[in-house]
Image: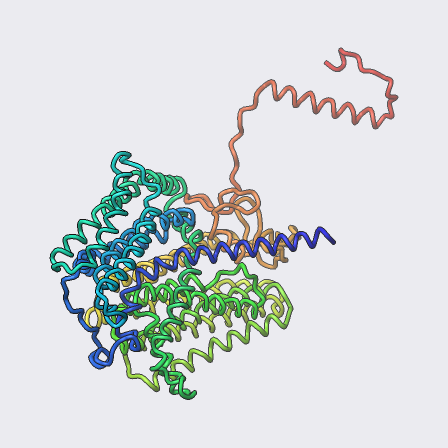
Amino acid sequence: MEEELEVEEDGINNNQAGTAKTLINVLMRLPFLLLIDYDVLFKPDLIPFSQSNNTLDTGQAESPVPGNSTADIFSFSMITETVVFQAFFKLVLLAVFFIFRNSDLKKFYSEGLNILVPIFCIHASISFNEEYTMSMFEGFTDNLIFRVAIVVSIKVVVQLVMGQVLLLCFRDLESPQLLVPLLKRTMMTSLAVHAFLSALILPESWMSVSGYVCAAPAAVLLLFLFYKITVEDANVYLLLGNRDMELIHNFGLPFYLESRWNMARVPVVLRTYWCLRFAVTILQSWHELSLVEAFSWSGLYSDGEVLLVRGCESYVALLGMTSIISLISHAISLIFQSMLKLDDSEKSFASVSAILFFILALQTGLPDLTPEKRFYQLCKNGCLLLTAVLHYVHSLVDTSLVTLASSTNNKNKHIRGLFVCMCLLVFPVGLLFSLWSRFAVGTWILAVTVFCIEAVIKVLVTLTVYFLTIWDVYYQDGVWESFDDWIFYIKSFGNSVQVVFAVFLFLNGGWVLFFEAGGSFRAFMMVIHAYYNIWLEAKSGWSTFWKRRTAASKVGSLQDATPEQITKNADVCPICYQAMTTAKLTRCRHMFHNSCLKKWLHKQDSCPMCLELLHKVDATSQTEEVVQPPEEIDPIFQEAMMMDELYEELDQIFEDRNIDEDIQLEPELIH
């Protein structure tokens, strides 16, 4: 009992440790997504309560008034607002987000803080000296000397605090050994001197020059620190790169990507980010939501429209929504697996739905659309994704019903499978009726219609095969020779309809590409669709048909076994283990059912019993017995065989005459 309690405690501790690691991983990777998505998440039109009334009326942020502040030297907007810089910056962040481990991220954060904190301190010290002047204390006292003393004291204290923070950031900086200690001592003095100078009434140009000069020691130390991190510590990142390249070389790129995906827990991070972003969007739109005042279905619809549109307004947000879609699809797959009593190891729809949703979003340019068009396109993509759910559920119930029809009498499982099939027949019809009654004819509604009709046809094919299998197993006496042919014809009909619909969808996509919304990504997806869903499917169907035709011709060339041969053999078919009323006789004199032998010839061209070749392309009959030419026998081996036969004959003679065991043969008689 104590051992069981210890095992349970260990399991709980392991779960808690795993949860803590996941939480740490999420917290360490969320800032990268926030930095990538900052220009969309915090753009002015999404924060109406933080802007003035003029900004709300025009929908644009107020342009800052240009000034002559010395802090403008640290404004890099001319560089950072370029498209090239933003794209490069986001790619670097994505690479760090995906490749770096938690230990690497800790080092990255520590080095980043060592760079950013000195920059902030230098910027803050210069800005503080310019903004806090003696005019701020005019109401406090009229004594000029007292005001100067107050301003100087405050600025000196602030500068000393900034200097101590800078010294803390530069604590590991040692080289060059002669220059760094001198710069550290000079930095504290220069900051204090700048505080005294800013309290004096000096020309503005002099203040600008003094700010640059006093910040020079800290700036030089910052350059040395940046050199140390980027150059001297570059070997660490080179080792990380070599480690990744070695992993790719040994195990391949797919394994590397999968390992990095699992290590970074990308789905969990994306879901957490999207949920946080959703909460921020609710706060930003709080005064615009209808449900804040009173609950109504129309208000719920409008609020949901606003939140969904803002939930996919950037590509990072789209990735987060894709992860949420994946989670919902996984829950749907678990529901149907439990309904059909299937194992949890069955294929899940989560990854397929995520890939499909993301491809549809990229194909239609979802984040780049206007809010009205984005919501409309999101609904259309949702309808297409819903049809994919129908096809996935059909794949589950198809496997389940085919297995149940031939292996179990559990009525509960049969009823569950038939109920799911009924739902798959009713739901597409209801969906099509709803769509066609509300929308005009278009390319997207034609695509949804084709997918729904295809799902219905697949369900009908599955039910037909299921009932035929039930009839063959439980109600058919003997072997139904044409059962396999009927199953083949029915499934071939379903596959043919699927190929025809694939061709129609290709033409429909071509119409969209040339006349509605073109794009290189859509053209690429059409090529993929044409290769996998049309060419490969048609090629596979033709290969199956040709194999069946070849097998039928081979079996037809064999001789039918006579009733006397079947009665004399008095055995079951070696393939299906059922009694034979009719059979085919092979060249090696083995008998099989006609249908069983056809199935065997789909895989091999040899006898299932002796593995002799069943079919030869020559003038010899396929059923006549082939006489093997006599082989030359070794004389020594032949003499040994004759001696063995002689010994056996002598033993038989002695047994017949009841000769006593003590009698021994003379050597001459033996020879």
Q: Is residue 84 visible?
A: no
In this rendered view, identify the residue nearer to me: 345 or 567: 345
Is the residue 47 above or below the residue 484 in the image? below
Of all residues, the one furthest to the top in this rendering is: 668
Is the residue 49 above or below the residue 398 in the image? below
**Quadrant assignment, res 329:** bottom left
Image location (x, y in percent) of residue 121: 29, 54
In this rendered view, identify the residue nearer to me: 512 or 484: 512
Image location (x, y in percent) of residue 611: 53, 43
In this rendered view, identify the residue nearer to me: 147 or 48: 147
**Quadrant assignment, res 344:** bottom right
Image location (x, y in percent) of residue 506: 28, 67
Residue drawn at (52%, 67%), measured in percent from left and top? 334
Is the residue 139 above or below the residue 259 in the image? below
Q: The C terminus appears in which quarter of the rendering?
A: top right
Is the residue 601 above or below the residue 335 in the image? above
Residue drawn at (59%, 71%), measured in percent from left and top? 414
Residue drawn at (27%, 53%), measured in percent from left and top? 119
